Image: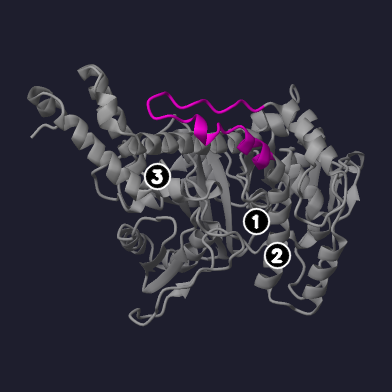
């Protein structure tokens, strides 16, 4: 693809309305639509303007000029990719202009029940792209070039790729009327509530998906699907809304999965140079998913170009490389980011039946600015030894043409065990910071969670050792010390994990305190208390009830009923004028 010359991407006249003019009110139409998508964009190539934003739908969705520019440039493969036909890929951009209020009232509820790695992105947009480039003699340039882009805060790459596969070919033939009808259908979808299996109708097809929940057991396999008896046509069942075919993504680097997992864990900067946006974005998304259930909290860009507004920020040499995984297709980045410690160069993908040729480990000094050969260029030495049995098992499975989903399950299970094993001592130490339940009394402020001290944690490893569940050999203690001396305890990964665990523990403390209050004799407590103290108790109990009913506190229903009864008892003991204030008619 040639990049347009001139001032950059522009917004062409849209068929479906005027340029965006402000965010919609919470009660406005499209509330259900915005539970799934922020907007749908169409990007075209204009001979005079270059990449142009042809339309945004719904037309009142607000995008800043910088966001529009990023969407335009990232929706087309660059000139080094040479993508003919149809191509799907994804990108991730930083939201500009500050936090925008979510429109859908169930957003907070949906996020509270979702795994942390699948919650909405508060400061970034995902762009899911379906790009078509075909010869067309009716076009002055000789090619039809257009992208349909779904913009969302949800990392549901499998679902949105499937949706684009249905919608984009039809849209490229019929244009605007088709797109408007699809958006109307999405606006009828139920909210993506975690734990539910949903039927999502679109263009005469029903997509059946399970929305992951925190209650789902890791590696339990796809959930049982709903009955198809009353659905005509029978639904297209997606086994996952977010998981990629991990084996296909990692085919050229299976021998180095262990090393890549350690780099991701430590938040090391990594440049991924791929032959196309599709390969680039899938590799980056696969890498960032290999830490689950730990949320990948560092920055990552599945597809990145020199036109991105963060280009200077990521390529500066005045400071250490940022903790970001960058997917690119332009070899120019090899020269620009020569100072980065880790570069993964991927060659053209092999035919599905071929045994994958594994990229070799190479020293960063062997990087060439031109014609860099495929390889993993790094001086990093792993602390955990490579699992040779796993590699043999996967390669043998490829030889015997074992189903890809079975192979992917093996690889995903291995990565899951690695992460869980690394987190196990951290979880054990974190649990020791929780105050004892016997120290929680009903009429006193709950005790504080003890602070996390890295030195204490490392000393605890020396006595008990990391309780790793996977059968890997290596300097496991050294990995924690390396994590301590390098980035992990200062990285977004640790910060995100610690904040989440601390929040859960604080909620547990609050729930235990509420239970202690409900088990106490409140009538004895009230005997020598002033009206101010009694009213204060009512207000605090009500606040706890609101939080508990909003699924923010792990409280049993019996405790909630008892708390409501206590509130009624306490209010009934107050003078009539205060009762009216606390319980207005």
Image: magenta residue range: 426-452
Q: Along the horizontal axis of the image, is 383 left or right of 573? A: right
Q: Which secondary structure is most common in the magenta stretch?
A: loop
Q: Give the Cα distance between marks 2 and 3.
A: 43 Å
The residue wearing badge 2 is: 248
Q: Is residue 2 magenta?
A: no
The residue wearing badge 3 is: 555
Q: Position of residue 300 (x, y in %)?
A: 63, 42
Residue at 49%, 59% (x, y): give it. Answer: 160
Along the line of sight, which residue is nearer the eye, 172 or 217? 217
Give the crowd class for mark 2: few <14, some 14-19, many >=20 residues within 10 Å.
Answer: some
Q: Along the horizontal axis of the image, is 494 left or right of 507? A: right
The answer to whether the residue labelled 1 contacts the one labelled 2, judged by CB atoms less than 8 Å apart, is yes
Q: Can residue 396 be seen from the camera position used here?
A: yes
Q: Is residue 325 above or below residue 77?
A: above
**Which circle marks residue 282 in the picture?**
1
The colour scheme used here is one colour
Give the crowd class for mark 1: few <14, some 14-19, many >=20 residues within 10 Å.
Answer: many
Under tag 3, what secondary structure? loop
């Amino acid at each position: 693809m040639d990049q347009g010359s001139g001032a950059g991407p522009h917004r062409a006249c849209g068929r479906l309305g005027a340029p965006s003019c402000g965010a919609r009110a919470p009660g406005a139409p499209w509330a259900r639509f915005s539970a799934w998508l922020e907007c749908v964009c169409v990007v075209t190539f204009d001979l005079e303007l270059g990449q142009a934003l042809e339309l945004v739908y719904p037309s009142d969705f607000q995008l800043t000029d910088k966001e529009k520019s990023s969407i335009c440039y990232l929706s087309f493969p660059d000139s080094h990719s040479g993508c003919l036909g149809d191509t799907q890929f994804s990108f991730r951009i930083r939201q500009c202009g500050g936090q925008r209020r979510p429109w859908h009232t169930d957003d907070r509820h949906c996020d509270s029940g979702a795994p942390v790695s699948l919650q909405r992105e508060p400061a970034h947009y995902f762009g899911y792209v379906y790009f078509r480039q075909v010869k067309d003699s009716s076009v002055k340039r000789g090619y039809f070039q257009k992208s349909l882009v779904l913009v969302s805060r949800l990392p549901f790459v499998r679902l949105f790729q499937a949706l684009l596969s249905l919608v984009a070919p039809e849209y490229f033939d019929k244009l605007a009327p088709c797109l408007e009808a699809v958006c109307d259908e999405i606006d009828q979808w139920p909210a993506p509530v975690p734990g539910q299996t949903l039927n999502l109708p679109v263009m005469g097809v029903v997509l059946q998906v399970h929305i992951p929940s925190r209650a789902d057991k890791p590696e339990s396999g796809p959930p049982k699907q709903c009955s198809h008896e009353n659905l005509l046509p029978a639904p297209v069942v997606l086994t996952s809304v977010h998981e990629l075919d991990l084996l296909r993504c990692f085919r050229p680097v299976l021998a180095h999965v262990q090393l890549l997992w350690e780099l991701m864990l430590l938040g090391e900067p990594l440049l991924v140079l791929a032959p196309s946006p599709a390969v680039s974005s899938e590799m980056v998304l696969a890498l960032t998913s290999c830490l689950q259930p730990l949320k990948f909290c560092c920055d990552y860009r599945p597809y990145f170009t020199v036109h991105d507004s963060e280009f200077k920020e990521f390529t500066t040499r005045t400071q250490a490389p940022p903790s970001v995984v960058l997917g690119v297709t332009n070899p120019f980045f090899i020269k620009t980011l020569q100072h980065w410690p880790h570069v993964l160069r991927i060659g053209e993908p092999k035919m599905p039946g071929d045994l994958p040729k594994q990229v070799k480990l190479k020293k960063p000094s062997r990087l060439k600015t031109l014609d860099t050969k495929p390889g993993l260029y790094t001086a990093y030495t792993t602390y955990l030894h490579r699992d040779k049995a796993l590699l043999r098992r996967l390669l043998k499975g490829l030889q015997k043409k074992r189903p890809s989903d079975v192979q992917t399950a093996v690889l995903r299970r291995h990565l899951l065990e690695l992460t869980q094993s690394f987190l196990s001592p951290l979880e054990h130490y974190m649990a020791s910071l929780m105050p004892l339940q016997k120290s929680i009394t009903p009429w006193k402020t709950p005790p504080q969670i003890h602070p996390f001290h890295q030195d204490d944690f490392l000393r605890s490893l020396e006595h008990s050792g990391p309780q790793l569940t996977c059968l890997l050999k290596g300097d496991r203690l050294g990995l924690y010390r390396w994590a301590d001396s390098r980035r992990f305890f200062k990285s977004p990964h640790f910060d995100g994990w610690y904040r989440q665990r601390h929040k859960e523990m604080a909620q547990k403390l609050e729930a235990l305190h509420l239970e202690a209050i409900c088990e106490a004799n409140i009538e004895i407590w009230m005997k020598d208390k002033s009206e101010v103290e009694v009213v204060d108790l009512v207000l605090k109990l009500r606040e706890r009830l609101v939080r508990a009913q909003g699924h923010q506190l792990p409280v049993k229903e019996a405790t909630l009923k008892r708390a409501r009864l206590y509130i009624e008892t306490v209010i009934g003991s107050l003078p009539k004028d205060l009762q009216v204030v606390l319980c207005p008619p």
